[in-house]
Amino acid sequence: MEKPCTSCESCLMPFSKDPGVRESDRYCSYCFKNGKLCYEGHDLKEFQKVCYESMRSHGMNPFKAKFFAWMIRFAPRWKK
C-alpha cells in the first residue's frame, strides 16, 4: 500500500504548514486552486523564482526562502 503524501508534489511545502484549504491530496493550497495547478508552465527556474518571491512576500528569511526554492527541484512534479 502506498503511503499518503505529506508534502506538496509541486513545491514540497509540508501539508502541516499549509495555511489554506487544500483541494488536492497531492498539492498544497498555493499550487492547486479551482481544480487546476496555478503554475501550468514547465520551467523549473521560473517556478522556483515565483515561489521564492512568494515566500519573501510572506516574511520568510531570504536564505531560508532561497534554500526551499532550491529544494523544489527534487519534488515529484519536476523530476525528469
Image: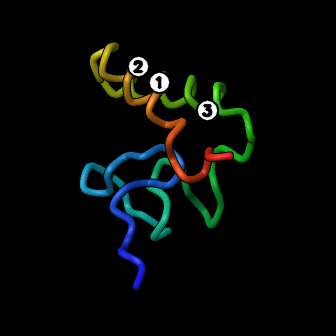
The 10 Å Cα crowd at callout 3, few under 14, some 14 to 19, many 20 or more, is some
Q: Amino acid at mark 3?
A: Phe
Q: Which residue is mark 3?
A: 47
Residue at horizontal 47 percent and vertical 26 percent from the top: 70
In the image, residue 41 lies at what x, y percent? 74, 41
The numbered mark at residue 66 is 2
Disc 1 to disc 2, C-alpha distance = 6 Å
The image shows residue 2, relative to residue 57, as above or below, that is below
Residue lying farthest to the top in this orientation: 62
Callout 3 touching callout 2 (CB < 8 Å): no
Q: Name the residue: 72% across, 47% down.
A: 40
Q: Secondary structure at mark 2?
A: helix
Give amino acid for label 2. Lys
Residue behind mark 1:
52
Residue 42 figure quarter: top right
Give me the residue at 40% from left, 85% from top: 1
So how many labels did they put on this image? 3
The picture quadrant where one finds residue 58 is top left
Q: Secondary structure at mark 3?
A: helix
Position of residue 6 relative to residue 77, above or below, is below
CB contact under 8 Å: marks 1 and 2? yes
Distance from Cα at disc 3 to Cα at disc 2: 13 Å
Mark closer to the chain start, 1 or 3: 3
Q: Secondary structure at mark 1?
A: helix
- Determine the residue positioned at 32% across, 14% down: 63
Label 1 and label 3: CA atoms lie apart by: 9 Å
Q: Position of residue 68 (x, y in %)?
A: 39, 30
